[in-house]
Image: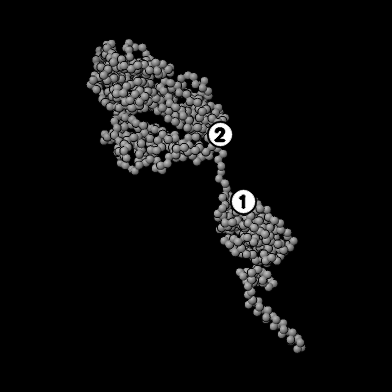
């Protein structure tokens, strides 16, 4: 009995001593081999693993697995020192079923990671702060098979050659919730710092988790797309970010830094051109409504503005109309549409249309032909010029608006040979394959031409230009709204030579004044009794009304209208001299109709007649060197006539002084705008 008691005392003592050791033992360590059996080395102290096999996330880089004989933890990457991951596990993983027969094989440098199929990861490898991606194949958050006898590759070193980690795909077996702090980097296909060369557990399935390390400082992402087409070099970009805009000013009639600002520009960029600048009634000038530095850059072109009167009788420049302004952005058409000095800037494209094509200028009475095949699909990208729909459109000129019809003839054709014939007085021609375009102008001016090409699939390509119709010297145009029924005539005189104007009575008496130029002695299209006035100018080569290049007298009336329909009159002088002065007069030739208001006996005769007048509103355009300098007689210019109705009514329009040689486009205008009611004034009484 004593022996039994002794034995029980010994067991009790041993049990108490054992518990004391377990509670108080705290041995320091470097590796797990410095610790007693069953303990691990953590934080420099031997501690009990406490049977905890659940994953805590990749917070400190240490695993809960037992070390192998070399002191390493099985399934962990020696170099995986990422301590900044904030992955949060969705749930505790089920410990792996022991499998001591797994054999590890070296991992391919292309990072084709595999993970143990015996367990399911609790978090995806979405480390956002990793600056050296070494965690792709060593997900330290995986629950490690604590009985796995595989030996970790202790020779794991930084593989700096792993520059194209493109094999990571989504781990379709990973049931863990993605770390909500991570951002999925779906473009990370060029991770140049993936150095993971760990020996993988061959029992693991393919780790296809996308590497979403968005904070990798050396991750260049998807390479910038290389344009396979020609990127046009910007030769002369506008570098002034203000585009020449000056501070806001109430009037531009000032001298700013040595430059007079009445120049047809919106210098302070307030949407008004030359506000506050003076002008003469009827005067016109080229203008540009965009930013000053964009004028005549790229597709931008001038418009026109007229001198108008306000409610108080003050004359100033009106709205700038008719030009081409910059677009907000470039379009792919080989042109600088936003007028910043760069063609198709920032665009990667292969345009089938060339809107920078130079259409040149035109001349009155000469056929202007444009080959659209030099504009659209010149590189034969589509080869559909014959099946596409071509639409050519011209805007009307000043006299077109007065007469209500065009003073040009247009025609479209599929071939140049198809352009024979005069064409139609219209603004638009459209049809399949009409790649050839012809126009014949009767008058000078600036016309906006638009081309629209519509492919059979609905794609549309468009261009627009300003087509200027120019001729040297002085050109005076007359048109009026009653041209079908009233005969109005244009007269031109030269100071120092012309001695008077011809009235209806003078003409009827055969006493026409041959020192002026008008229908009787200047008309080149009809034969009359008179001869050209002797003003001292020689003949010049130019186009006649039939489009023939021939010798023409100066001055000459090449268009005459004797109440023959909706057409203008026009006088030309190709070769004026510097300082020559001319005067323009418009003469009402038609007498009014009579209507009897008091019939005599048996209505055999009329005792009293009443005159029936037709009120006419003539418009005169003055061109110097092809540039429109003035338009007189329109309502918006404030120079409209309201009582021009009787025979011999005479409108003294303007005096013109030529400035420069025959190639100049400068002239000085002094409007008169007075009307002599029922008689023709003396030339000297201007």
Q: Position of residue 511 (x, y in %)?
A: 27, 12
Which residue is pictured at 38% across the width and 21% down the height? 567
Can residue 175 be seen here? The reply is no
Number of the label disc, if any, that sits on residue 457: 2
Estimate how packed mark 2 is, as few (under 14), some (14 to 19) or many (20 or more) residues with alpha carbons within 10 Å: few
Q: Nearer the viewer, residue 457 or 205?
A: 205
Residue 393 against residue 166 in the figure, above or below: above
Mark toward the start of the polypeptide (1 vs 2): 1
Q: Position of residue 138 (x, y in %)?
A: 64, 59
The Cα atoms of the two marked residues, 1 and 2, are separated by: 45 Å
Q: Nearer the viewer, residue 608 or 417?
A: 417
Q: Position of residue 24 (x, y in %)?
A: 63, 77
Which residue is pictured at 66% across the width and 55% down the height? 113
Q: Is residue 370 left or right of residue 259?
A: right
Quarter of the image with the N terminus in it: bottom right
Q: Is residue 290 left or right of residue 453?
A: left
Give residue 626's quadrant in the image. Answer: top left
Give residue 668's quadrant in the image. Answer: top left
Q: Position of residue 17 (x, y in %)?
A: 67, 80
């Amino acid at each position: 009995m004593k022996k039994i008691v002794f034995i029980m005392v010994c067991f009790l003592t041993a049990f108490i001593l054992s518990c004391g050791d377990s509670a108080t033992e705290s041995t320091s360590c470097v590796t797990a081999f410095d610790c007693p059996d069953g303990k691990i080395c953590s934080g420099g102290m031997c501690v009990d693993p406490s049977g905890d096999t659940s994953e805590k996330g990749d917070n400190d880089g240490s695993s809960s697995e037992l070390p192998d004989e070399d002191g390493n933890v099985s399934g962990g990457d020696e170099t995986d020192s990422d301590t900044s991951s904030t992955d949060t596990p969705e749930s505790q993983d089920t410990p792996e079923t022991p499998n001591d027969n797994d054999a590890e094989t070296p991992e391919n440098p292309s990072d084709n990671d595999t993970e143990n199929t015996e367990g399911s990861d609790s978090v995806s490898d979405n480390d956002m702060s990793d600056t050296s991606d070494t965690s792709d194949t060593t997900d330290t958050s995986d629950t490690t098979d604590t009985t796995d006898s595989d030996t970790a590759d202790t020779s794991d070193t930084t593989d700096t050659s792993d520059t194209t980690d493109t094999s990571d795909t989504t781990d379709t077996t990973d049931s863990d919730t993605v770390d909500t702090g991570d951002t999925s980097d779906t473009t990370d296909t060029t991770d140049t710092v993936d150095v993971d060369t760990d020996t993988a557990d061959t029992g693991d399935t393919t780790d296809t988790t996308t590497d979403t390390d968005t904070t990798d400082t050396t991750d260049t992402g998807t390479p910038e797309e290389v344009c396979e087409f020609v990127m046009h070099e910007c030769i002369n970009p506008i570098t002034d970010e203000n585009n020449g805009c000056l501070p806001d000013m109430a009037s531009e009639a000032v001298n700013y830094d040595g430059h007079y600002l009445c120049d047809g520009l919106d210098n302070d960029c307030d949407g008004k051109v030359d506000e506050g600048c003076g002008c003469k009634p009827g005067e016109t000038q080229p203008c540009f409504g965009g930013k000053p530095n964009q004028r005549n850059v790229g597709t931008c072109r001038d418009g026109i503005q007229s001198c108008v009167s306000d409610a108080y009788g003050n004359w100033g420049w009106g709205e700038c109309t008719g030009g081409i302004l910059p677009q907000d952005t470039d379009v792919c058409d080989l042109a600088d549409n936003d007028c910043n000095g760069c063609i198709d800037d920032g665009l990667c494209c292969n345009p089938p249309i060339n809107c920078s094509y130079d259409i040149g200028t035109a001349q009155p009475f000469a056929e202007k032909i444009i080959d659209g095949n030099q504009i659209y699909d010149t590189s034969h990208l589509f080869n559909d010029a014959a099946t596409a729909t071509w639409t050519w459109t011209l805007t009307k000129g000043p006299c077109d608006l007065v007469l209500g019809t065009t003073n040009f003839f247009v025609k479209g054709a599929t071939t140049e040979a198809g352009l024979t014939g005069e064409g139609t007085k219209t603004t638009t021609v459209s049809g399949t394959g009409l790649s050839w375009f012809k126009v014949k102008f009767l008058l000078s001016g600036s016309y906006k031409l638009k081309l629209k090409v519509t492919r059979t699939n609905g794609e549309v390509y468009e261009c627009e230009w300003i087509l200027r119709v120019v001729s040297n010297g002085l050109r005076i145009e007359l048109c009026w709204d009653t041209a079908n029924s009233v005969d109005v005539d244009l007269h031109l005189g030269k100071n120092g030579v012309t001695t008077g104007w011809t009235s209806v009575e003078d003409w009827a008496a055969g006493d026409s004044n041959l020192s002026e130029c008008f229908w009787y002695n200047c008309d080149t299209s009809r034969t009359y009794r008179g001869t050209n006035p002797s003003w001292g100018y020689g003949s010049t080569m130019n186009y006649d009304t039939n489009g023939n290049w021939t010798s023409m007298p100066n001055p000459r009336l090449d268009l005459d209208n004797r109440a023959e329909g909706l057409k203008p009159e026009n006088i030309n002088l190709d070769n004026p001299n510097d300082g020559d002065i001319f005067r323009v007069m418009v003469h009402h030739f038609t007498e009014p109709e009579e209507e009897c208001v008091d019939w005599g006996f048996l209505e055999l005769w009329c005792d009293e007649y009443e005159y029936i007048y037709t009120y006419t509103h003539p418009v005169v355009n003055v061109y110097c060197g092809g540039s429109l300098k003035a338009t007189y007689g329109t309502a918006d210019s404030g120079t409209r006539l309201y009582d021009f109705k009787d025979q011999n009514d005479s409108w003294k329009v303007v005096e013109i002084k030529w400035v420069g040689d025959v190639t100049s486009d400068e002239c000085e205008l002094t409007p008169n705008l007075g009307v002599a009611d029922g008689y023709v004034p003396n030339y000297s009484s201007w």
